[in-house]
C-alpha cells in the first residue's frame, strides 16, 4: 500500500469518528504517515458524522478526503452524498442492515455487510462500526492484525477498556462475513 484515503460516514453515535481513530492509530503503529479529520453536525447523536483518514508511505498534503479510495457508508444520506466521489476502482462498504439501496456505479467494488445485524446478534448492539472495521481490514489489509489490535487498544478510553474484547469480537465477525 502506498496511499489509502478513507471516508467513513454516517449518523452521530454510530462510532464513525472512533473507527477512524482506530484506523489512524493502526497506521501509526504500522509506521505510516497518517491524518485523521473528523467532521460532524451540531447534534451529538443523530446528526451527521464523517471522518477522513489518510494512510501513506509519504507525507500527506491534505487531511481532507474528497475522492476516497474507500467509502464506508453507515446510513443512506451518506451513501447518497458520497457514492459518486469514490475513485474509479475504489471500494464502497455498505451497512445493508440500515441501507437497502444498491450502489449504482459499476466502476467500484461494493461490499454489502449487515453490520448492525451482526453486532446485535452477537449481543453487542451499537458495535456495527467494529464489524465494518473488520470487513475493511479484511478487504484492504491496511495494517497487520497486531497493529490493528494495538490501534484499538490505544483508541479505547481507559474507562471503557472493559469493552476491548467485545470490540475485538466484532472486528473478528467482520473479517468472517
Image (cartoon, rainbow, N blue to C red):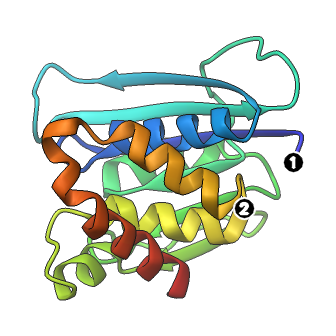
Position of residue 103 measured from the top left corner of the image (x, y, whole percent): 55, 68
Q: Circle 1 sits on which residue?
A: 1
Residue lying at the far top in this picture: please name it: 61
Q: Tell whether 116 sits left or right of 73.
A: left
**Residue shown at the point (54%, 71%) measured from the top left:** 135
Q: Say whether marks 2 and 1 touch (CB < 8 Å).
A: yes
Asked where in the image residue 115 lies, by quadrant, the reply is bottom left
92 in relation to 51, above or below: below
**Residue shown at the point (73%, 41%) measured from the top left:** 30
**Between 120 and 162, the one nearer to me in the picture:** 162
**Between 33 and 98, the one nearer to me in the picture:** 33
**Residue shown at the point (30%, 34%) measured from the top left:** 49
Report, in whole angstroms, how far the alpha carbon at label 2 lies from the one at label 1. 9 Å
**Between 16 and 164, the one nearer to me in the picture:** 164
Position of residue 157 measured from the top left corner of the image (x, y, whole percent): 24, 36
Query: Can you tell which mark lies on residue 140?
Result: 2
Position of residue 164 measured from the top left corner of the image (x, y, whole percent): 29, 58
Amino acid at each position: 500500500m502506498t496511499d489509502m484515503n478513507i471516508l467513513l460516514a454516517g449518523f452521530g453515535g454510530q462510532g464513525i469518528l472512533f473507527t477512524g481513530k482506530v484506523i489512524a492509530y493502526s497506521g501509526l503503529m504500522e509506521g505510516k504517515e497518517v491524518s485523521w479529520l473528523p467532521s460532524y453536525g451540531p447534534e451529538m447523536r443523530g446528526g451527521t458524522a464523517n471522518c477522513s483518514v489518510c494512510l501513506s508511505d509519504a507525507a500527506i498534503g491534505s487531511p481532507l478526503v474528497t475522492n476516497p479510495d474507500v467509502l464506508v457508508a453507515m446510513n443512506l444520506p451518506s451513501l447518497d452524498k458520497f457514492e459518486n466521489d469514490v475513485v474509479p476502482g475504489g471500494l464502497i462498504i455498505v451497512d445493508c442492515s440500515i441501507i437497502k439501496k444498491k450502489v449504482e456505479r459499476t466502476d467500484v467494488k461494493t461490499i454489502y455487510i449487515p453490520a448492525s445485524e451482526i453486532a446485535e446478534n452477537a449481543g453487542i448492539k451499537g458495535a456495527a462500526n467494529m464489524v465494518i472495521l473488520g470487513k475493511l481490514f479484511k478487504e484492504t489489509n491496511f495494517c497487520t492484525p497486531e497493529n490493528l489490535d494495538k490501534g484499538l487498544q490505544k483508541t479505547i478510553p481507559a474507562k471503557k477498556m472493559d469493552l476491548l474484547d467485545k470490540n475485538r469480537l466484532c472486528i473478528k465477525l467482520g473479517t468472517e462475513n
